[in-house]
Image (tube, rainbow, N blue to C red):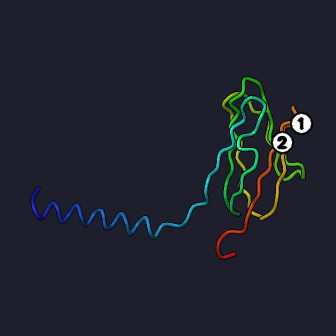
Amino acid sequence: MTFARTLSLGAIILLEAITIAGSPVRAADTEVRIDNFTFNPKQITVKAGDTVTWVNHDDIPHTVASQTQVFRSKALDTDDKFSFTFATPGTYPYFCALHPVMTGTIVVEASAGK
């Protein structure tokens, strides 16, 4: 590799690093698996602004429904997904409306700087 090519490659890497560092911070994405009539993990903690996605890995439909009616999915068939972005800190217990013994909890903490 020539000196000029090495210098160009270094400049590209530096520009990419600057671009990444200057990019807006994205909220985290967290996945909850629905499998064997359970939500896994059963309880998670996220930051305000984070998105939680539930994925049904069971062979039968399930739903994701907040006990306080903040969010509610349609019936999710196998491999269907439902996502919700949590904007407000708090505790969000939820359940499957088709199988109410299936329960879980999302704990939302304030984001840094709020």
Residue found at the far top of this picture: 59
Q: Position of residue 28 (x, y in %)?
A: 61, 57
**Residue at mark 2:** 103
Q: Position of residue 95 (x, y in %)?
A: 85, 42
Marks 1 and 2 sit apart, C-alpha to C-alpha, by 7 Å
Q: Nearer the viewer, residue 103 or 82?
A: 103
Secondary structure under the numbered disc 1 in the rendered image: loop
- Asked if the residues shown at circle 1 and circle 2 are in contact, with their CB atoms under 8 angstroms apart, the answer is yes
Examine the rendered structure and indicate whether residue 52 appears above or below residue 61: below
Question: Dot 1: within a 10 Å radius of its alpha carbon, few (fewer than 14), some, or many (20 or more) residues?
Answer: few
Task: Identify the residue at image location x=70%, y=46%.
Answer: 83
Q: Is residue 103 left or right of residue 59?
A: right
The N terminus lies in quadrant: bottom left
The C terminus lies in quadrant: bottom right
Tag shown at residue 89? none
Task: Identify the residue at image location x=33%, y=67%.
Answer: 15
Examine the rendered structure and indicate whether residue 8 appears above or below residue 96: below
Residue found at the far left of this picture: 2
Total marks drawn?
Answer: 2
Task: Identify the residue at image location x=84%, y=37%.
Answer: 102
**Which amino acid, by three-letter code, is at mark 2?**
Thr
Q: Is residue 102 left or right of residue 28?
A: right
**Residue at mark 1:** 100
Q: Position of residue 47 (x, y in %)?
A: 68, 62
**Which amino acid, by three-letter code, is at mark 1?**
Pro
Examine the rendered structure and indicate whether residue 96 appears above or below residue 113: above
Q: Position of residue 26 (x, y in %)?
A: 57, 61
Q: Quadrant of residue 35?
A: top right
